[in-house]
Image: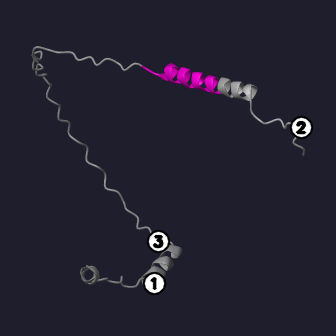
Amino acid sequence: MSYAIPADEPGGAAPAALSLLVHGVLFAVLVFGLRWQSKHPDAVVAELWSELPAIEPPEPKVEPKPEIKPQPKPEPRAEQKQSKPDIAIEREKKLAKKKEPPLKFDTTQRIREQLAQEQKAL
């Protein structure tokens, strides 16, 4: 490259003007958008009373006495003893065999050990 021919330097009046125009449009959109969405706060309205209105007690309702009707005696039923199906009996036997006494954990001992460890750490 020779120094005799001047190189075109980037930048100038046209890019600067375009940049200012784009920034101006962006600013205008932001201002318009914020004003467009702004909402004036609603006024607070309170209704003041000098005193509460008097409450009148409701009139008691007169209820008629209910008629007592003799209830019919139920007929005795002949209950039939239903036997359990064989499958249910087998399942109960299997469950009885499989059930083991539940394990009992001494939670208080575990809590005491944890408390002792935490106190040592302090």
Whole-number angstrom distance, CA of label 3 to CA of label 1: 21 Å
Sequence-earlier tag: 3 or 2: 2
Whether 34 is among the magenta residues is yes
Q: CA distance from mark 2 to mark 1?
A: 101 Å
Q: Which mark is residue 98?
A: 1
Task: Give the label, 3 or 2, closer to the camera.
Answer: 2
Secondary structure of the residue carrying numbered label 2: loop
Say whether disc 3 or disc 1 marks the residue closer to the N-terminus: 3
Name above or below for residue 97 compared with residue 58.
below
Span shown in magenta: 23-39
**Residue 104, percent across and down?**
31, 83
Residue 33 image point, x, y percent:
55, 23
Read off the residue under disc 3. Answer: 84
List x then y, in percent, for residue 60. Answer: 10, 22
Q: Answer whether labels 3 and 2 touch (C-beta < 8 Å).
A: no
- The amino acid type of the residue labelled 2 equals Ile
Query: Residue at the location (63% across, 27% down)?
Result: 23
Report helix, strand or loop for mark 3: loop
